[in-house]
Image (tube, rainbow, N blue to C red):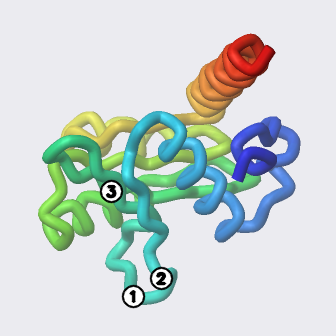
Amino acid sequence: MEELRQSSINEIDKMDGRQFEEYLSSLYESLGYQTEVTKGSGDFGADLVLKNNNETIIVQAKRYSNKVSLQAVQEIVAAKGYYIANHAWVVTNNYFTEPARKLAAANDVLLIDRDLLIKLSAQVNRQNTQNQSNMEQISQ
């Protein structure tokens, strides 16, 4: 899990879709979410289910070499109702098309693009490094 969590964006770009889902699961777990990777086929558009306090967040993970289109937003909007989720997110290692951004804004879907993913990953890596340093100091 630790190795997965510390993946760089270049490593993420080489992952397949399922590996990207596992990476995001690990990333959000380290941020305090309970995570579940859905089974793949028949997931009704959600790749991850995150729980934090009494909120449910569904995530569509898109590890793409091109921009993510509005279809991903359409899928997660439909999945939000199915999962009775409080929030819906689409996370990608790339960027979103303008129609995808417009549809997401109209449906209260959070879009996490490449730049935000890099920032989020860096934040988690800093936290992990700090935690490791604290543990080393305590054990001395």
Residue type at mark 1 is: Gly
Residue type at mark 3 is: Ile
Picture residue at 71% right of the left edge, 64% below the top: 19
Residue neighbourhood size for the residue with mark 3, other residues' Cα within 10 Å, grouped as few (<14), some (14–19), many (≥20): many
Residue 115 % position (x, y): 63, 25
Q: Earlier in the sequence, mark 2 or mark 3?
A: 2
C-alpha distance separating marks 2 and 3: 14 Å
Residue neighbourhood size for the residue with mark 1, other residues' Cα within 10 Å, grouped as few (<14), some (14–19), many (≥20): few
User: Contact, CB < 8 Å: mark 1 with mark 3?
Assistant: no
Secondary structure category for the residue under label 1: loop
Q: Residue furthest bottom?
A: 42
Residue 31 % position (x, y): 47, 34
**Which residue position is annotated with label 3?**
58
User: Contact, CB < 8 Å: mark 2 with mark 3?
Assistant: no
Secondary structure category for the residue under label 3: strand
Residue type at mark 2 is: Lys
C-alpha distance separating marks 1 and 3: 14 Å
**Which residue position is annotated with label 2?**
39
Q: Earlier in the sequence, mark 1 or mark 3?
A: 1
**Which residue position is annotated with label 1?**
42
C-alpha distance separating marks 2 and 1: 7 Å
Secondary structure category for the residue under label 2: loop
Q: Nearer the viewer, mark 2 or mark 1?
A: 2
Picture residue at 75% right of the left edge, 50% below the top: 4
Is 2 displayed left or right of 81 in the figure?
Answer: right
Q: Quadrant of residue 8?
A: top right
